Image: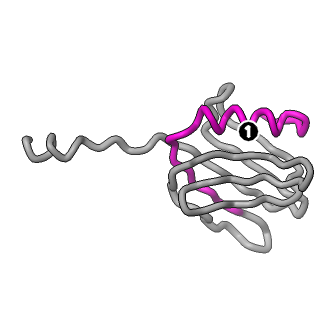
Amino acid sequence: MKLEKSQWSVYFDLISKALGGKRAEIEVTSLKLGDQVEAHWLPFFGVSYDPKDDLISLVLEGHDHLIHKPREIYIEGEGLEFTSLEIIDADGVRQIVVLRDPLMLPAPSAVKAG
């Protein structure tokens, strides 16, 4: 689903609150760069759009990914529960963000007991 530019700020504010605790992978792809993984399953803190600077900021643990002059945004998922986000900037570079729940491991005491 394509998001209209008028929705970006409000939508990102809402999903940032709803998606805390997810892990994110960011892949950057273009004809010049090829495919590159920018971040590999880091804790996801949020995403925001600053209309004044025409800038999207993706915030992950230990990593901020900035996208200048975004042109189009597509989401895959329902409502506030999206599984992936594709942002295309003015140069046609695609930034693909995939979210997933963190792997739930048993507590250390449960492992020792078993």
Q: Give x and y (percent) for residue 73.
A: 80, 44
Write the residue at 55% across / 39% down: 20
Residue 69 in which image quadrant: bottom right
Above or below, 51 relative to 29? above
- From the viewer's perspective, is 17 left or right of 57? left
Q: Give x and y (percent) for residue 28.
A: 69, 62
- From the viewer's perspective, is 66 left or right of 24? right
Write the residue at 88% across / 35% down: 4
**Total marks in image:** 1
Span shown in magenta:
1-28
Extreme residue in the front direction:
52
Above or below, 35 relative to 102? below
Q: What sort of colour scheme is used for the picture?
A: one colour
Write the residue at 69% across / 46% down: 47
Q: Amino acid at mark 1?
A: Phe
Task: Assign the C terminus to one quadrant of the image.
Answer: top left
Q: Nearer the viewer, residue 67 or 10?
A: 10
Magenta residue check for 25: yes
Residue 105 in which image quadrant: top left
Name the residue carrying label 1: 12
Magenta residue check for 103: no
Write the residue at 38% across / 44% down: 103
Residue 83 in which image quadrant: top right
**SS assignment at label 1:** helix
Above or below, 45 relative to 3? below
Extreme residue in the left direction:
113
Above or below, 2 relative to 96? above
Q: Give x and y (percent) for residue 82.
A: 64, 35
- From the viewer's perspective, is 56 left or right of 103? right
What crowding class fits label 1: few (fewer than 14 Cα within 10 Å), some (14-19), or many (20 or more)? some
Task: Assign the N terminus to one quadrant of the image.
Answer: top right
